[in-house]
Image: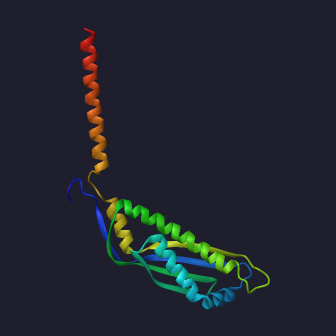
Amino acid sequence: MPLFAKRSVAIHGFVGYVRLTVISDDQGDERLFGEAMERQKQLDAEIRLQVRTTLGDEFEVLTVNFSRGSLHVLVALGTVGVFYMSFSRYESFIKSVNLLVGQLKSLLQRVFGNQSGFVNQVPVTVTGSWQPSSVINAANLSFEASWGIESSQLVLAYLLVSHAALLGVLIWLVVRHLK
């Protein structure tokens, strides 16, 4: 690798899961699952829109699965084609995925916490997490193992050396003028 080249990694295929769990305080697990099945198309469309809005057109939802036992929502994320991710873009991607988890939690809280079909509204708790795939973990390891000098470090070194030289010339001129 050239000394000043920025490292980038090809990302493609499956990139990870977003796992969400909706828990009802009244043990209404079947009610939650039934509501999810009734609204499956709507939830699927809203989740896909949220992923595209938050992560961009390079990412897509591979599957959205609903399962019993409270309500578990599993969103598999993948890429559309291949793109190259640099370190700064990786940092942005991780922040965006964390934002996506929060937005999907809010979506499920809004849908299942405010159900109009029930007389007694029962509070629900929504938890969520992100589990990256081996492709993302490999990219992270690659960036951590990256060596070389970034261009910003080179510019900083140049500025320090040039300002030190100019300061030396100024001091020399002042001392010479005082004699």
Q: Residue at x 64, y 88 (%)?
A: 33
- State the residue lying farthest toward the top: 179
Q: Is residue 137 left or right of residue 159?
A: right
- State the residue lying farthest toward the left: 2
**Residue 5 place in picture, x, y as percent:** 24, 57
Q: Residue at x 74, y 81 (%)?
A: 26
The C terminus lies in quadrant: top left
Q: Residue at x 62, y 77 (%)?
A: 108
Q: Which of the 4 image quadrants contains residue 12?
A: bottom left
Quick check: 174 above or below 41?
above
Q: Disc count in the image? A: 0
State the residue in front, 84 or 46.
46
**Residue 98 place in picture, x, y as percent:** 51, 67
**Residue 83 place in picture, x, y as percent:** 32, 72
State the residue in front, 126 or 37.
37
- State the residue lying farthest toward the right: 119
**Residue 10 place in picture, x, y as percent:** 30, 71
Quick check: 28 above or below 153?
below
Quick check: 3 above or below 95?
above
Q: Which of the 4 image quadrants contains residue 134?
A: bottom left
Q: Is residue 46 left or right of residue 117?
A: left
The N terminus lies in quadrant: bottom left
Q: Residue at x 24, y 13 (%)?
A: 176
